[in-house]
Amino acid sequence: MRHGESIANVMNIITEDPDEHPLTERGIEQVLFSAEQMKGLKFDGVISSPILRARQTAKTVADVLNLEIKTDKRIRESGLGPYNKYRIEDIPKMNREDLGMEPWDAQVKRMRNALNDIDGCYILVSHALPIRAVTASFLEMDEKESYGIDIKHASMTAIDLDKNKLLSIGTLLLTDRIKKLFSEC
């Protein structure tokens, strides 16, 4: 699950700061809507990125679903290097490595490692680019091939790790098929 809308999103900046840019009221509403979609499903807990907007999202979801929260730095925001707190439109149109940002493959690796260490059914709360990276890895796409994958605020990307299969990408509504699968976890 991606975090809800944050102050950083409203300001149109990218940031990996751990304790700044909380959720907006709209962001909280988005998260509550998604949490309602997950009511009645079986989860073992919530695992959150250590970034404030993700922690707030995870707490809201955990409160609605009566679940415990863990934090895992591997599902954190993308490493932004010298462009932390930059407005998106002010970032040069160059590849991530040339900008001194965390490489795409490193994001895929850390997200896959986090997933591989999961035993059970968990809700992971992360950020758009790391979610897109791990989603693209299941589709065997590179960064450029994945540009069309849209990970909306408070959206859910469901993955069946046992079958190595994506069930949904960036959805705001869980289908009956997905609900059935997660009710049997």
Image: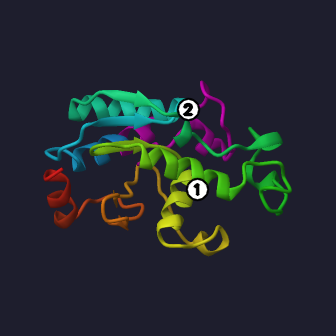
What residue would you read off at disc 2?
A: 51
Q: Residue at x 72, y 54 (%)?
A: 103
**Total marks in image:** 2
Residue kind at label 1, given as amino acid type = Val
Magenta segment? 1-30
Q: How does the figure colour the protein chain or chains?
A: rainbow
Q: Position of residue 40 (x, y in %)?
A: 13, 45
| Residue 154 placement, left or right of 101 | left
| Residue 4 placement, left or right of 8 | left
Secondary structure mostly seen in the magenta stretch: loop
Local packing at callout 1 (Cα closer than 10 Å; few below 14, some 14-19, many 20+) is many
Res. 46 image quadrant: top left
Instruction: Say if the magenta span includes residue 28.
Output: yes
Task: Kindly state the secondary structure of the residue where label 1 is placed.
Answer: helix
Q: Nearer the viewer, mark 1 or mark 2?
A: 1
| Residue 16 placement, left or right of 119 | right
Q: Residue at x 43, y 48 (%)?
A: 115
Q: Seen from this angle, which residue lies furthest top?
A: 19
What residue would you read off at disc 1?
A: 108
Residue situated in front as seen by the camera: 140 or 35: 140
Q: Position of residue 104 (x, y in %)?
A: 67, 58
Q: Residue at x 63, y 70 (%)?
A: 142
Residue situated in front as seen by the camera: 101 or 16: 101
For residue 20, say whether it is visible. Answer: yes
Residue situated in front as seen by the camera: 104 or 168: 104
Q: Position of residue 77 (x, y in %)?
A: 60, 42
| Residue 46 placement, left or right of 140 | left
Local packing at callout 2 (Cα closer than 10 Å; few below 14, some 14-19, many 20+) is many
Q: CA distance from mark 1 to mark 2?
A: 18 Å
132 in relation to 25, above or below: below
Residue situated in front as seen by the camera: 149 or 34: 149
